[in-house]
Amino acid sequence: MNVVKGLQDLIRHEEIELDQLYISVRMKKDDIIRTLMSEGFKKVKLENKMTSQIGNGFAKSLSKPWEMHVRLVDIQQQGLIAIRGEVEVSRRYVQHLSSIRCPVIYELESILKKHSIEYRIWNSKVRDYISQIIEDHQIRLLAPRLPAMPWRLMACVVMALVAGTALKFLEIWR
């Protein structure tokens, strides 16, 4: 990639998961939220919040078992908000807790272009804006080894086992 100062840098394959790139926009938080909601994103109720994150994150279901998770982060500059996105196993599944998360930029870029929103891509490694992307990394996410197990199904199974054990312990059921 080329950065604004005219220098070139690259992100190595092993650095992809480090989340060095994010999109910065100069607009109101409510306008960004409206745009995300119009694209099918929903507010996330439970999440690990990043430092300086603005409000709750947003998630959009992709093909099973994936979802895209987007967070808005306050940049301590005049009126700039960072948009950070990642693809991960959906929070509907138990595997969400231990799954790999892959940062995304192009998916967010296409949403912003569709809504004619001006943006810039910031690289936190070189601490500068990117002026041109020379070559793309192609990332292929592999589904979890075990089939995706929904939380609700797991909760029902656990509750049935607890109830059966309690009935046996109380000698109601033999």
Image (cartoon, grey):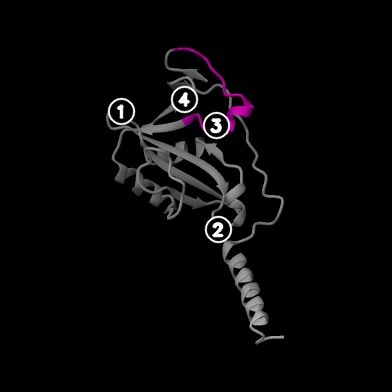
Callout 4 secondary element: strand
CA–CA distance between discs 3 and 2?
Answer: 24 Å
Q: Is residue 151 above or below residue 7?
A: below
Q: Is residue 164 left or right of residue 40?
A: right
Residue type, label 1: Gln
Residue 125, magenta (yes or no): no
CA–CA distance between discs 4 and 1?
Answer: 15 Å
The span shown in magenta is: 6-21
Callout 3 secondary element: helix
Q: Which residue is mark 3?
A: 18
Q: Position of residue 13 (x, y in %)?
A: 63, 27
Residue type, label 4: Asn
Q: Is residue 166 above or below residue 44?
A: below
Which label sits on residue 123?
A: 4
Which label sits on residue 92?
A: 2
Which of the image's four quarters has the C terminus?
bottom right
Locate residue 163: give its quadrant: bottom right
Residue type, label 2: Arg
Callout 2 secondary element: loop
Residue ID at (42%, 13%): 5
Callout 1 secondary element: loop
User: Closest to the observer: 160 or 135?
Assistant: 160
CA–CA distance between discs 4 and 2?
Answer: 31 Å
CA–CA distance between discs 1 and 3?
Answer: 23 Å
Which label sits on residue 77?
A: 1
Of callouts 3 and 2, which one flags the residue occurring earlier in the amino acid sequence? 3
Q: Badge 1: few (under 14), some or many (20 or more) residues near its Cα, within 10 Å?
A: few
Of callouts 4 and 2, which one flags the residue occurring earlier in the amino acid sequence? 2
Is there CB contact under 8 Å for labels 4 and 2?
no
Residue type, label 3: Leu
